[in-house]
């Protein structure tokens, strides 16, 4: 069953006298529970596409539908609330608040939303990710891989239907990279989620159910 659909996505920027086509007519469909990898060189449009799919940016043309809901038709506040409740984000730089403990970082989105914290689920997620004994620590005292695991836990705790990861292994060594992607894939299966990962690492992409390759703002090929 289709959970996400992008139809004719375009994102154009004007820089001085030049028009930059970051996305130039992208259409794709993602099935519920699918692990999709988006691959491409720097400037190919893959991060722009992820931002559109997650409602972090609005396309110049085209629409994104999540469970039949058009993100473009929502007001800004409505889209923010919808995004917070339906989509989890994992970024390359972790985006942990340095003065908050790992526990406080993980529960922050729920507190911002005024939602109840499911402590049993929190224990399950942090145990699965191997950071249950790190919850009282500050981010700077953890390794890069541990910080990324905390960022994954934060994304999972809202129980999103879709998990979006933008170069989640870009700051990690090769061994830790494969561990993190393996955990993302395990979490997808364990918690019945759809996973979309933007990456430039071929070994990461090969772990996905399907690979989309981007070039010049367009989908150049698909595998799987």
Image (tube, helix red, strand yellow):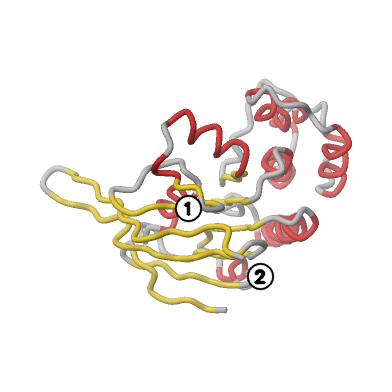
Q: Which mark is residue 207?
A: 2
Up-down: is 138 above or below 11?
A: above
Res. 193 image quadrant = bottom right
Res. 195 image quadrant = bottom right
Image quadrant for the C terminus?
bottom right
Q: Sequence order check: which comes first, mark 2 or mark 1?
A: 1
Q: Name the residue under label 1.
A: 65
Residue at the (19%, 45%) spot, across then down: 14
Relative side of 119 to 100, left or right? right
Disc 2/disc 1 C-alpha distance (Å): 26 Å
For this orientation, the residue located farthest to the left is: 17
Residue at the (77%, 26%) spot, across then down: 116
Could you tell me residue 100's position as x and y percent?
Answer: 70, 22
Q: Is mark 1 on a helix, strand or loop?
A: strand
Could you tell me residue 148's position as x and y percent?
Answer: 68, 44
Q: What element carries label 2?
A: loop
Res. 203 image quadrant = bottom right
For this orientation, the residue located farthest to the front is: 68
Residue at the (65%, 56%) spot, across then down: 173
Q: Residues within 10 Å of mark 2 (few under 14, many from 20)?
A: some
Could you tell me residue 105's position as x and y percent?
Answer: 70, 29
Could you tell me residue 115's position as x and y percent?
Answer: 71, 26
């Amino acid at each position: 069953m289709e959970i996400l659909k992008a139809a004719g996505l375009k994102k154009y920027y004007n820089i001085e006298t030049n028009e930059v086509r970051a996305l130039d007519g992208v259409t794709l469909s993602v099935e519920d529970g699918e692990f999709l990898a988006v691959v491409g060189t720097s400037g190919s449009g893959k991060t722009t596409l992820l931002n559109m799919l997650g409602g972090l940016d609005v396309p110049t043309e085209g629409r994104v539908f999540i469970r039949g809901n058009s993100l473009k038709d929502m007001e800004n506040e409505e889209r923010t609330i919808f995004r917070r409740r339906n989509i989890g984000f994992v970024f390359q730089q972790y985006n942990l608040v340095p003065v908050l403990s790992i526990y406080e970082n993980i529960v922050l989105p729920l507190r911002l939303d005024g939602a109840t914290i499911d402590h049993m689920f929190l224990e399950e997620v942090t145990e699965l990710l191997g950071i249950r004994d790190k919850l009282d620590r500050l981010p700077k005292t953890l390794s890069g891989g541990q910080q990324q695991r905390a960022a994954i836990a934060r994304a999972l705790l809202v129980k999103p239907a879709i998990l979006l990861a933008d170069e989640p292994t870009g700051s990690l060594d090769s061994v830790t990279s494969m561990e993190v992607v393996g955990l993302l894939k395990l979490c997808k299966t364990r918690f019945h989620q759809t996973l979309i990962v933007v990456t430039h690492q071929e070994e990461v992409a090969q772990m996905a159910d399907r690979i989309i390759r981007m070039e010049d703002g367009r989908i150049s090929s698909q595998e799987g």
